[in-house]
Amino acid sequence: MHAEVFFTPHQVDEMYLRDKTVLVIDVLRASTTIAAALYNGAREIIPVATVESAMKIVGNLAGDVTLLGGERNGKMIEGFHLGNSPLEYKEDRVRGRSIVFSTTNGSQAMVKARFAREMAMLSFVNVSTVAGFVSETDADFVILCAGRNGHFSMEDSVCAGMLMQKLIDQGHRVTYGDAGSAALTLYKSNGRSLLKMLKSSEHGRYLAEIGFGDDLKFCAEVDSLPVLPLLVGNVVKLKKEPELAPASIQS
Ligand code: MLT
């Protein structure tokens, strides 16, 4: 299987991702938060690129069961119910809820991958589960790192390398280009000290500065949330169920 790695969504066009298996990574923090929300019983995540789209969609959905979640500059958006800390997405808050979700980089990457054949959200907390999924599909795949404001981010790249290394360790013959090779190298030099790597990353330092230091520890916990968040129709959820899909991903 061939692994193609993009370090930022700006490197790739959405039509290139069409009909491919795409793994979207935003370790800090969108992918981790989505895993936490679904693990804790959220019904679905509805990713949207802009705050305006989020407000519009939530206005069209049943108020009691829908929450607005996300961030700008790492902080909760005015009028939203939840920010983007995975620690906020506790069972009593999210069980049974649809969450309209907009973040700076993570949801942009998800929107970009909306025409994928399969799209899964990947972070350290569910890396073995996602590796199992890729292993089952046994097909070429694309890793799309959310990055940070159009730039490379260390944590997403290390996570990409970890996923690739897991597949290699499982006996898959994984081919890759220079980007994949770089991701593997970064994983090999940082994999044993993920929390340290997160603490020294640009976004990790920023999150600690604005009071979200505890999130780093949560995001560094490998396989703590063994879930597979998958794009199903226009929403991200855990299992494929026939449904009426009331909302759509909007750019
Ligand atoms: C993003 O999508 O840019 C992030 O998840 C930012 C964050 O809240 O840490």
Image (cartoon, helix red, strand yellow):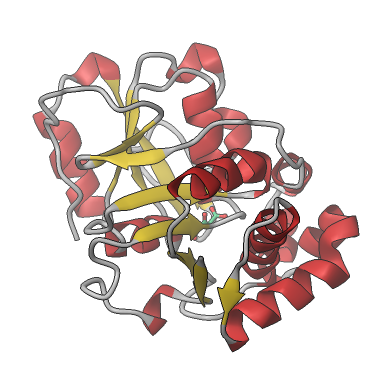
Quadrant (top left, top right, bottom left, bottom right) of the C terminus: bottom left
Q: In the image, what residue occupies the spot 38% across and 63% down?
A: 109
Asked whether 243 or 171 is in front, the reply is 171
Q: In the image, what residue occupies the spot 42% across and 45% down?
A: 70
- Residue 27 lies left or right of residue 80; in this view the side is right
Quadrant for residue 215, please give it: top right
Counting from the top left corner in percent of width and height, residue 67 is at 33, 28
- Residue 238 lies left or right of residue 175; in this view the side is left
Counting from the top left corner in percent of width and height, residue 189 is at 87, 71
All told, the count of numbered labels is 0
Counting from the top left corner in percent of width and height, residue 179 is at 59, 83
Q: Is residue 164 above or below residue 4?
A: above
- Residue 83 lies left or right of residue 64; in this view the side is right
Asked whether 210 or 38 is in front, the reply is 38
Counting from the top left corner in percent of width and height, residue 213 is at 76, 48
Q: In the image, what residue occupies the spot 53% across and 20% down?
A: 40
Q: Is residue 169 above or below residue 238?
A: below
Can residue 76 be seen in this snapshot?
no
Q: Is residue 107 above or below residue 142?
A: above
Can residue 204 be seen in this snapshot?
yes
Q: In the image, what residue occupies the spot 34% across and 20% down?
A: 97
Asked whether 206 or 231 is in front, the reply is 231
Residue situated furthest bottom in the rendering? 178
